[in-house]
Image (spheres, rainbow, N blue to C red):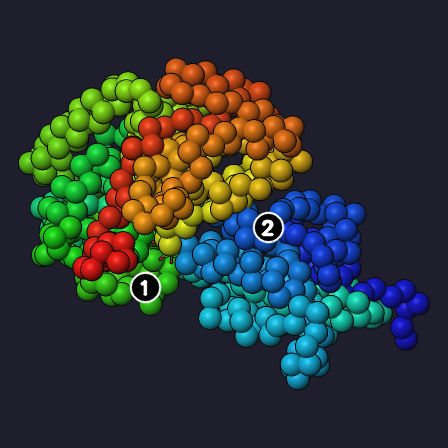
Amino acid sequence: MTSAELTDGAHLVVDALTLNGVDTLYGLVGIPVTDLARLAQASGIRFIGFRHESSAGRAAAAAGFLTGRPGVSLTVSAPGFLNGLVALAEATTNCFPVVQISGSSERHIVDLKQGDYEELDQLAAARPFVKAAYRVSRAQDIGRGVARALRTAVSGRPGGVYLDIPAAVLGETLDADRGAASLWRLVDPAPRQLPAPEAVDRAIELLAGAERPLVVLGKGAAYARADEVIREFVDTTGLPFLPMSMAKGLIPDDHPQSVAAARSLALKRADVVLLVGARLNWLLGHGEPPQWNPDAKFLQIDIEPTELDSNQPIAAPLVGDIGSVVGALVERMKPGQITVAEAWRRELAERTEQNTAKMAERLAADPHPMQFYGALRAIRDVLRAHPHTYLVNEGANALDFARNVIDMQVPRHRLDSGTWGVMGVGMGYAIAAAVETGRPVVAVEGDSAFGFSGMELETICRYGLPVVVVILNNGGVYRGDGVNPASADPSPTTLSPMARHEKLIEAFGGRGYHVESPVELASALTEALESGRPALIDCHIDPTAGTESGHLTNLNPSVAVRPSGTGE
Ligand code: ADP
């Protein structure tokens, strides 16, 4: 017997998402997903509409990191899908849980390459870049497809999942009761994964025998939401710790055991290193000399067993979720078993003191035009008074300097260019932080980095989000004094000198400021933050300030650039 009521694919997608607690979609509409977005909104899911799919995808990825539940983005077919795929690949690299749902063209036309509107084999295109890619080919499989996509995104090592839904499936009708019965809600989407006791004891013994131990906290540790047990482990052992950029604030940056200010020394000298949700990738110099002590032993906590031994031998693999593993370390270590030698503590403290003094000197200088440090001192001071503000940060120098200058006091309040070092995450991440938390967000942006997602200022204003964009504007990529020796064209690193970015936000009804000194910046930022309204502060920075590629100059191949025709 069938009921008289019918449902369709689009309703089932919305119902399946709602059933699994998805309350926000980040997307950009068009054929064939416009009605899906309308329906989602009408059904109580918040739809945040963007100006470019890569920002929507980045927002969904940031939502995943900030909430521990998969963020979901929605795009149209082929070009929209591909725009979103960039963000999905980044999320996979960053280990953020996110699902991109894209509408797609008719299968029979795509598969015979007959030439459809926005024709692309999206499933095949997505596969190399994501944790998993699935297609739903029948409306009756939508519940299964959504459940599978959400489960895959958030369980084990989190990552990006692509879910392809052809237009015909969105429009396919089926019996409403049968449709409802085809949906399910995930039980325990990201189950805990406990380590074996002998693996824990092995790690404890190595730490107990260390002369110069070090703990490195990565963004996996921040994501794991194991804040209390990590804090207990660090406090009871007294181990020095180094936070990677997005782990800043997991334990407050002013904690006496933080060795952030003695980073180089800590890496070079540590003999036993416990990595907690941090990979030994390029960001940690692959664990190799000269950055690291050649005799260092690495211990690694990670949910992904294939991560271990990717760069260096792992003397104590601890496979499991960070909460369970650190909990087991705390439970199984004997009181006083892990200690830190006074000599090592002193060595680190002395270097911290020296480096902090050098930094204080740089921050105290007040040159005109303003330089990065002057601007960042002002931002740091305002944020210290507003410690629950979310901080988004991208750029070259704007990223490298801000990471060192701006302390974080609370976990998961810093979002930045991440594992790939991506420019363009700024507005998407800022929007997600504001939407998901309702709290104020400050995005500290290089002028070049900002350009990649700048049009999302309109999105920020349209939704009235409490986002303050601070542009450290030195008029160029890296710096604003690039020279073209051959013609009147601007050099490759030159952007519009003296661009007044604040006028961009004024076009959409936001508040714009232009500042030329740290005092003006502090006052504008305070006012903007306290207003809770969209604002943009254009900070005029000396065009000669900044280093090519920031701290990554060494990654550029060495090329001698000479204009053609010079005979060399
Ligand atoms: P960072 O860039 O801050 O050093 P990475 O992104 O390189 O951090 O490393 C994060 C690591 O954390 C990844 O290898 C990932 O598998 C791991 N991870 C993510 N979530 C968890 C979790 N809940 N438990 C254990 N490991 C996790």
* Rendered location of residue 392, percent (x, y): 45, 38
Q: Nearer the viewer, mark 1 or mark 2?
A: 2
Mark 1 CB within 8 Å of ligand 1: yes
Say the numbered circle drawn on residue 29.
none
Say the numbered circle drawn on residue 307.
1
Label 1 residue SS: helix
Q: Which residue extends farthest right?
A: 4
Instruction: Tell me the residue at 63%/46% (across/down).
Output: 50
Instruction: Tell me the residue at 20%/60% (across/down).
Output: 567
Q: Nearer the viewer, residue 150 or 443?
A: 443
Distance of label 1 from label 2 (alpha carbons): 33 Å
Task: Tell me the residue that label 2 is attached to.
Answer: 52
* Rendered location of residue 283, percent (x, y): 28, 51
Q: Mark 2 or mark 1, which is nearer the start of the sequence?
A: 2
Identity of the amino acid at label 1?
Glu
Identity of the amino acid at label 2?
His
Is residue 455 visible in this depiction of the protein?
yes
Q: Give the quarter of the figure containing the C terminus.
A: bottom left
* Rendered location of residue 357, percent (x, y): 17, 24
